[in-house]
Amino acid sequence: MFVVSLFANSLLIYIIISQRSLHSPMYILIAGMACVDLSFPLVCVPNMLLSFLFDWRGISLIGCLVQMNFIHLVGTFPSTLLVWMALDRYFAICTPLYYYEHMAIRKFLKFVIPLVIRNVFIVLLVGALAGRLSFCFRNVINHCFCEHMALVELACGSTAINNLVGLISVFLVFVVDFLIITTSYIIIFSSMLRSGISGVKALHTCITHLVVISVSLTITLITFLSYRIRNDLPASIRVFFSTMYSLFPSCFNPIIYGIRTKEIRQHILKTLTRCHFVQTVPHS
């Protein structure tokens, strides 16, 4: 999955950068999603593989906190990028005459900057609170990488504030983003129904985004609940879901965008054909 993620996301980024016809806001946002999907496994998988292959399991507390902050910071941006994609579709379908005006960098920054500040602030706050905990007994994390709740479980003092801030951060990032995305698509579909526009291409693009949203949010919810619902769920199952949270979307997203987005699919096939990865069969 790590190799698939590296190859698929790198190819997607290369296609969008190299093809001038794809230098539009929607494709730039897809390239941004590919960058996030590429960096997520790069943070945790190499260290995970070293621990599996060479039994290099040690990490300092500072190193653990740095890795945790980076993982969670990168982890906040898939839903944020999906918000920007939903806004892009809203402007393209509901206000097509003013699309490029709304999506101009200066105007679109008012949607970008607040969400970026929110993500950075929440992750730094969660990391700072975790760094203040006392770790006096156990020092073994039941995980392949440093995840917030896996680290908090090792603390010997009260972790009520950490749990509360963790819950609030999930609400402020994932729930708020989900509500914005849902509202945007409700307005989009109701606008299309009222105007009687078929909008097959627009609808096709929206469905692609909705598939990615559904998969990402489902995995996020399962990972989040696996740590907070007290049950007899084995630690290995929680680790598996957390690992899938970092690996599965990074493999799934570029494949879905590559298959379901016609312009990207055509350029990918041309590139792979030139590189002899795909062989064309002549018609008889």
Image: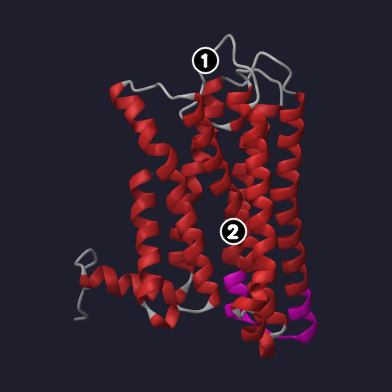
**Quadrant of res 223:** top right
Which residue is depicted at the point 71% across and 35% down? Answer: 166
Residue type at the position of mark 2: Val
Is residue 251 something one can see in this rendering? Answer: no
Question: What span is colored magenta in the figure?
Answer: 190-206
Marks 2 and 1, how far apart in space? 40 Å
| Colouring of the image | secondary structure
Residue furthest top in the image: 137
Q: Main secondary structure of the magenta part?
A: helix
Quadrant of the image occupied by residue 221 = top right
For marks 2 and 1, give the one nearer the viewer.
Answer: 1
Give the position of the N terminus as an image quadrant: top left
Residue at (62% x, 61% y) in the render: 82
Who's the residue at 70% across and 28% down the image? Answer: 228
Q: Earlier in the sequence, mark 2 or mark 1?
A: 1
**x and y, in percent, of residue 227 in the image:** 65, 28
Q: Position of residue 69 (x, y in %)?
A: 56, 39
Q: Looking at the rendering, in which quadrant would you find the C terminus?
A: bottom left
Q: Amino acid at mark 1?
A: Asn
Q: Does 76 sit above or below residue 65?
A: below
Residue 269: x and y in percent read 32, 71
Q: Nearer the viewer, residue 137 or 29?
A: 137
141 magenta-colored? no
Residue 3: % across, % down: 33, 47
Report which residue position mark 1 lands on: 139
Judging by the rendered image, the residue that carries numbered circle 2 is 211
Between 79 and 189, which is closer to the camera in this rendering?
Answer: 79
Q: Is residue 229 visible?
A: yes
Q: Dot 1, how many residues are within 10 Å of its Cα: few (below 14), some (14-19), or many (20+)?
A: few
